[in-house]
Image (cartoon, helix red, strand yellow):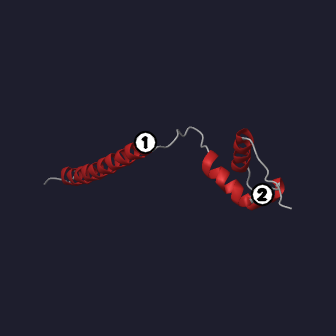
Amino acid sequence: MGESRQRYSEDFKEKTVQYIQEQTKSVPQIAEELNIPAGTLHQWLAKHRKFENEPLVDREAIRQKDYKIEEQATEIEDLKEEIAILKKAMHIFSKERN
């Protein structure tokens, strides 16, 4: 006869994912410990994984972060250019005059 499938509550899944994140063990080790297939745990991780201080990610949030990264990259390039100009000016003005 067929084996009946084990059903787990959402609360149990979330607590299990939190447990996995807190452990230094691999997912297969934890799967063996809990007697739950590793593939099932990976699915739960994909669905329930939460990072501290990380809001839920949606496409708009990703676009905003990408835009901010591009702005910061441009600002970094501008600042590098300004530093190079200041170094040249400092070198010119620090020369001894005869």
Q: Which residue is mark 2?
A: 31
Mark 1 vs mark 2, CA separation in Å:
33 Å
Residue 26 seen in render: no
Q: Residues within 10 Å of mark 1 (few under 14, many from 20)?
A: few
Q: Position of residue 54 (x, y in %)?
A: 54, 40
Q: Residue at x 22, y 54 (%)?
A: 88
Q: Position of residue 10 (x, y in %)?
A: 70, 41
Q: Which residue is mark 1?
A: 61
Query: Which of the marked residues, 1 or 2, is nearer the chain's N terminus?
Result: 2
Quadrant where the N terminus sits is: bottom right
Q: Is residue 53 left or right of residue 75?
A: right
Quadrant where the C terminus sits is: bottom left
Q: Which mark is residue 14?
A: none
Residue in front for this viewpoint, 8 or 51: 8
Q: Residue furthest left?
A: 98
Q: Amino acid at mark 2?
A: Ala
Q: Quadrant of residue 3?
A: bottom right
Q: Is residue 13 left or right of residue 53?
A: right
Q: Position of residue 15 (x, y in %)?
A: 73, 42
Label 1 with label 2: CB-CB less than 8 Å: no
Q: Residues within 10 Å of mark 2 (few under 14, many from 20)?
A: some
Q: Quadrant of residue 68?
A: top left
**SS at mark 2 in the image:** helix
Q: Amino acid at mark 1?
A: Ala
Q: Residue at x 79, y 50 (%)?
A: 6
Residue in front for this viewpoint, 69 or 64: 64
